[in-house]
């Protein structure tokens, strides 16, 4: 795999081996594909796991079941951290090393899905098995239980998330801290795109923080591989506050630019310490975007009028006019950006505007984002061990991991956005 254009500090390779669950759900898990290739041979199973596998062999269990038991025996499940409609999250640790903490995400069996597994879970396993990067949450292992639930053993990330950081008024931070957090998130996006993966649900509470201060991208329940040219894709993805205009207009074909827009919204929120583009409906979301960036036209965005839900400028509702129709809006000038984002400086504003170009073809790609001069000018990014920390604790781990792709925490300013589950899974 390619190396990153910009690396602010050396990172160890966190890749480890994992094996997938056996019968009675092996057929469903076979859809995922065994693409996880460890950088080094997995450690030998501890004596307890080896003896368990040997014992089950005499009981007529097939090889898949023996392998599953051996994987499951490597971990000890402790207290419950959180529960949602989609999953229950438990604390846990490696049996042979109680200091090696993990979070065990138990996916609930759901008879509505084939083999009882939600497609979100299959996607999460598939892509986390393929992607190994210091800024992406690590999937240690997968195993099934006798009650046919599927358990994902994930990296333990106890320090909350980026949204929690800016919401915590007791924490103070500056441009150097924002630069460090933003760069780690951009590193993760670059790596996903280099490996032809779209995340499609980037937001502050999907950027979790490890014990050492490292930002880790999580929740790959809406991720998908890049589509073949001409193949239609769903536009009803990405939590509304972070959804780019091309998806709001019903675009069938898109690329990494959708993730770049979402990432820029997260960076803007860190600088503002509030939501950047809040709305209550999709129509209002478009109005908010047009009020800030101007109403898109064929002159500023060639081809925009061919999108399914595009509305001519004279029919665009304005958030500032209470939803009344108004003439085409002009984009905010540099004075507005400087007054709104004084923490970022001119270089940070230039980066943000490049990531938020209305026309996705003019939007910076992940490689150009990491090559931007913002990262090299003063102040230098704060070292991760010196970054402000929220704390979070075990309860925050459960809250962050229990959600399904596209879900948001309750009470977040009316953000209960129902992202459609009827997605085009043929692209897998």
Image (cartoon, helix red, strand yellow):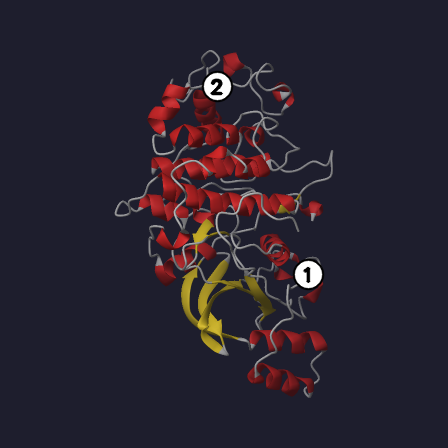
Q: Residue at x 48, y 13 (%)?
A: 328
Q: Residue at x 33, y 50 (%)?
A: 388
Do the CB atoms of the residues marked 1 and 2 lie less than 8 Å apart?
A: no
Look at the image and tell me whether residue 236 can be seen: no
Outermost residue, left direction?
170
Q: Residue at x 42, y 16 (%)?
A: 324
- Give the image location of residue 85, x and y in percent: 48, 56
Above or below — where is 291 with respect to 116?
A: above
Judge the density around disc 1: few (<14), some (14-19), many (≥20) Cα neighbours within 10 Å. Answer: some
Look at the image and tell me whether residue 221 can be seen: yes
N-term mark: 1 or 2? 1
Name the residue that disc number 1 marks.
28
Name the residue that disc number 2 marks.
294
Relative placement, left or right, of 234 versus 93 is: right
Above or below — where is 35 with respect to 303?
A: below
Judge the density around disc 2: few (<14), some (14-19), many (≥20) Cα neighbours within 10 Å. Answer: some
Relative placement, left or right, of 317 versus 234 is: left
Q: Residue at x 59, y 20 (%)?
A: 301
Residue 235, numbered label: none
Q: Nearer the viewer, residue 248 or 43?
A: 43
- Give the image location of residue 147, x and y in percent: 57, 71
Disc 2 secondary structure class: loop
- Give the image location of residue 423, x and y in percent: 63, 43
Above or below — where is 283 with respect to 10?
A: above
| Alpha-carbon span between mark 1 and mark 2 | 46 Å
- Give the image location of residue 133, x and y in percent: 56, 54
């Amino acid at each position: 795999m390619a190396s990153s254009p910009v690396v602010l500090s050396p990172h160890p390779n966190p890749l480890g081996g994992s094996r997938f669950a056996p019968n009675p759900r092996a057929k469903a898990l076979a859809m995922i594909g065994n693409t996880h290739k460890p950088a080094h041979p997995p450690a030998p199973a501890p004596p307890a796991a080896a003896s368990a596998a040997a014992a089950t062999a005499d009981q007529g269990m097939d090889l898949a079941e023996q392998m599953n038991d051996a994987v499951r025996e490597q971990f000890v499940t402790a207290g419950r951290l959180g529960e949602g409609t989609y999953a229950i999250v438990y604390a846990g640790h490696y049996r042979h090393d109680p200091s090696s903490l993990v979070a065990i995400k138990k996916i609930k069996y759901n008879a509505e899905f084939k083999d009882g597994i939600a497609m979100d879970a299959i996607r999460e396993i598939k892509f986390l098995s393929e992607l190994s990067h210091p800024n992406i949450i690590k999937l240690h292992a997968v195993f099934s239980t006798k009650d046919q639930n599927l358990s994902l053993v994930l990296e333990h990330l106890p320090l909350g998330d980026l949204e929690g950081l800016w919401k915590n008024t007791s924490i103070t931070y500056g441009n150097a801290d924002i630069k460090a957090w933003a760069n780690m998130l951009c590193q993760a996006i670059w790596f996903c795109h280099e490996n032809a993966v779209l995340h499609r649900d980037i937001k502050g509470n999907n950027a979790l923080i490890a014990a050492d201060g490292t930002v880790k991208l999580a929740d790959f329940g809406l991720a998908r591989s890049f589509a073949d040219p001409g193949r239609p894709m769903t536009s009803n993805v990405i939590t509304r506050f972070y959804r780019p205009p091309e998806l709001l207009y019903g675009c069938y074909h898109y690329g990494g630019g959708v993730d770049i827009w979402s990432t820029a919204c997260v960076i803007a929120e860190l600088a503002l310490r509030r939501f950047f583009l809040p709305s209550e409906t999709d129509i209002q979301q478009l109005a908010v975007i047009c009020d800030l960036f101007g109403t898109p036209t064929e002159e500023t965005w060639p081809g925009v009028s061919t999108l399914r839900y595009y509305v001519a400028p004279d029919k665009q509702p304005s958030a500032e006019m209470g939803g009344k129709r108004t003439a085409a809006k002009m984009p905010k000038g540099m004075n507005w950006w400087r007054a709104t984002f004084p923490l970022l400086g001119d270089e940070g504003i230039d980066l943000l505007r490049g990531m938020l170009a209305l026309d996705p073809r003019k939007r910076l790609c992940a490689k150009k984002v990491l090559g931007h001069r913002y990262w090299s000018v003063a102040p230098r990014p704060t070292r991760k061990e010196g970054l402000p920390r929220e704390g979070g604790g075990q309860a925050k781990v459960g809250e962050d991991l229990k959600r399904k792709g596209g879900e948001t925490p309750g009470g977040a300013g009316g953000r209960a956005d129902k992202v459609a589950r009827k997605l085009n899974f043929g692209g897998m």
